Amino acid sequence: MKLCEKCGLNYINDDETLCEYCKETKAEINIGKYKKIEITDPIEREYLNFLVDWGYKEETEKGLKSTAYEYVWAINFVKNREIITYETLIVNIDKYIKEYDKFGKNQKIGVLGHNTIICSLKKFREFIIYKIMTKNNADFKVIKK
């Protein structure tokens, strides 16, 4: 098994070059590989820190970038695909979750990488709520599982 050469998200057999999504849609863009992501935006850094605080790993045992980076990459992917800013994504997060979730117009993209795209959008919504709650209420306490 290896990762799809086009999207870098879905696993395929060694003798294949594209995953079913990329074959079916003729992948409108090369979405690249999250392993190459560099955190440059303050929102990305805060989101990464939020994910790590909640137990998501930054690196695998082999030193590769892991789930936390995948989620930051996925949010950046949606932002670039939709040609929007972080501010627009934050204000309209529910709209984008609906579009990339089951029965949404971008459902096939939402399920890429074992649902990485849609899961990252939902976790980003939690991040937004957390930021609002902690900003508006200094006594707000988070109980981690």
Image (tube, grey):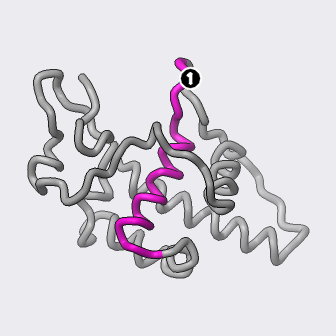
Q: Quadrant of residue 80?
A: bottom left
Q: How many marks?
A: 1
- Quadrant showing the C terminus: top right
Q: Residues within 10 Å of mark 1 (few under 14, many from 20)?
A: few
Residue shown at the point (49%, 61%) measured from the top left: 122
Residue 57 spot, x, y in % from top left: 60, 35
- Magenta residue check for 105: no
- When the figure is inspected, residue 74 is found, relative to residue 100, above or below; the finding is above
- When the figure is inspected, residue 14 is found, relative to residue 141, above or below; the finding is above
In the image, 43: left or right of 71?
A: right
Residue shown at the point (65%, 39%) measured from the top left: 55
Residue shown at the point (26%, 33%) measured from the top left: 11
| The residue stretch that appears in magenta | 62-84
Q: Quadrant of residue 61?
A: top right
Could you tell me the amino acid type at mark 1? Gly
SS category of the residue bearing label 1: loop
User: Mainly helix, strand or loop, the magenta region?
Assistant: helix
Q: Relative to the observer, which residue lies in front, 37 or 91?
A: 37
In the image, 38: left or right of 96?
A: right
Q: Looking at the image, which residue sits at the far top?
A: 62
Residue 1 spot, x, y in % from top left: 24, 22
Residue 106 spot, x, y in % from top left: 26, 67
- When the figure is inspected, residue 50 is found, relative to residue 19, above or below; the finding is below
Q: Which residue is mark 1?
A: 63
In the image, 43: left or right of 12?
A: right
Residue 117 spot, x, y in % from top left: 39, 55
- Magenta residue check for 83: yes
Q: Quadrant of residue 91?
A: bottom right
Q: Looking at the image, which residue sits at the far right?
A: 139
Residue shown at the point (41%, 69%) measured from the top left: 97
